[in-house]
């Protein structure tokens, strides 16, 4: 019987489970046996692989995290690790693989493709930092989680007349900050893609407070050069306004996926299996507008990212 493997790798993201479910169930209905590889490339190297059936993925579409677990694998970066991973696949007679993860995971998938494995990479990361696709699985949920937190912080910020810096994740990408910041009515959004002008920002904060603003929210992406703590100190020194820092951290990675993420994950999972019906596949699946598409994994990894830095200007106009 034809065999497909599936793994999740890198940081977990909400919707990974919905995606595993889609891969497993659509593969089974296409006549495949499906194997779940635990702990990403780490589990692949160790041969931690188990057969998945329809019921293995029951009751998971709404769950955050990943039932397959995940890891960031240093060993897979080595020649020895890669060879062991290939051996594990051969031992289980798996020559088709679906990899769900972020940039590093898709780079790993590319390595396996170069070794003759048919691979489809699906973008699973909250960061939305994969340039070739409009959206990654988990991004929408993370934005909504951050948005909920911003709403709560707004209440306290307003009650105490404070400035609050809310630090969100995203690695080198400012998308979570841009979307959650605009939707949350932030006064300022800071992203790694645009240099921060602290003096200009402080002037704006002072003007806002003189206008009678009760609070100011600054949404800062974690990849911005100046740290949240240093920024808070600088703002206090320059404005005399009390400034607090809230780092949202891992709450953004967990939680039940939104409808958008569940649907995206389901569509992409089904598409991956359709692609693997062909031989010698090395593709990454993405979404453009409302269309699911695929492209060569190498090209996908070399695409240039553009993002909505214009959202920063919208905040200036709207706050
Ligand atoms: O890639 C997802 C992400 O949550 C980033 O936003 C963050 O920088 C990083 O992972 C944190 O990784 P770790 O789980 O290794 O702490």
Image: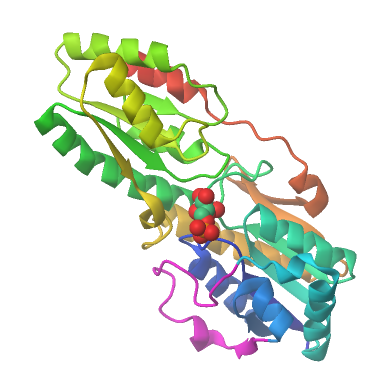
Q: Is residue 56 above or below residue 166?
A: below
The stretch drawn in magenta includes residue 159? no
Q: Position of residue 271 (x, y in %)?
A: 67, 62
**Quadrant showing the C terminus:** top left
Q: How many numbered callouts?
A: 0
Region rendered in magenta: 48-71
Residue at the image point whose x is 78% and y is 53% from the top: 297
- The image position of residue 249, as x and y in percent, is 39, 52
Colour pattern of the rendering:
rainbow
Q: Is residue 68 visible?
A: yes
Quarter placement of the N terminus = bottom right
Residue at figure coordinates x 73%, y 63% from the top left: 120
Q: Is residue 254 left or right of residue 5?
A: left
Residue 61 covered by magenta stretch: yes
- Give the image location of residue 131, x and y in percent: 66, 41
| Image quadrant where residue 207 sits | top left
Residue in front for this viewpoint, 208 or 300: 208
| Looking at the image, residue 105 lies above or below residue 6 | above
- Quadrant of res 318: top left
Q: Is residue 273 visible?
A: no
Residue at left 62%, top 55%?
Answer: 102
Q: Main secondary structure of the magenta part?
A: loop
Residue 111 in the image, given as x and y percentages of width and height: 82, 63
Instruction: Please tell me whether residue 190 is drawn above or below residue 6 in the rendered image.
Output: above
Compared with residue 186, is residue 138 higher up or lower down, i.e. above or below?
below
Judge by depth and name the residue closer to the eye, 22 or 169. Answer: 169
């Amino acid at each position: 019987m034809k065999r497909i493997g599936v793994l999740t790798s890198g940081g977990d993201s909400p919707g990974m489970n919905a995606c595993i479910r889609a891969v497993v169930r659509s593969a089974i209905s296409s006549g495949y046996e499906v194997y779940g590889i635990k702990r990403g490339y780490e589990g692949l190297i160790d041969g931690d692989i188990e057969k998945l059936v329809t019921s293995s993925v029951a009751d998971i579409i709404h769950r955050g995290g990943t039932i397959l677990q995940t890891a960031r694998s240093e060993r897979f970066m080595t020649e020895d690790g890669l060879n062991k991973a290939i051996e594990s696949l051969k031992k289980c007679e798996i020559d088709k693989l679906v990899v769900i993860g972020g940039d590093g995971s898709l780079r790993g998938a590319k390595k396996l493709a170069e070794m003759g494995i048919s691979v489809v990479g699906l973008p699973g990361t909250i960061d939305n930092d994969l340039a070739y696709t409009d959206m990654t699985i988990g991004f929408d949920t993370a934005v909504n989680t951050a948005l909920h937190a911003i709403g709560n912080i707004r209440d306290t910020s307003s009650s105490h007349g404070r400035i609050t810096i809310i630090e969100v994740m995203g690695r080198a990408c400012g998308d979570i900050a841009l979307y959650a910041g605009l939707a949350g009515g932030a006064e300022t959004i800071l992203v790694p893609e645009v240099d921060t002008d602290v003096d200009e920002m402080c002037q704006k904060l002072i003007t806002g407070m003189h206008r009678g603003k009760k609070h100011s929210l600054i949404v800062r992406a974690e990849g911005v050069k100046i740290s949240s703590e240093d920024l808070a100190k600088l703002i206090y020194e320059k404005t005399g306004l009390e400034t607090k820092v809230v780092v949202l951290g891992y709450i953004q990675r967990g939680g039940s996926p939104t409808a958008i993420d569940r649907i995206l994950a389901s569509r992409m999972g089904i598409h991956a299996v359709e692609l693997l019906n062909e031989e010698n596949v090395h593709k990454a699946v993405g979404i453009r507008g409302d269309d699911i598409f695929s492209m060569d994994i190498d090209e996908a990894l070399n695409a240039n990212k553009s993002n909505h830095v214009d959202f920063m200007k919208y905040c200036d106009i709207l706050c």
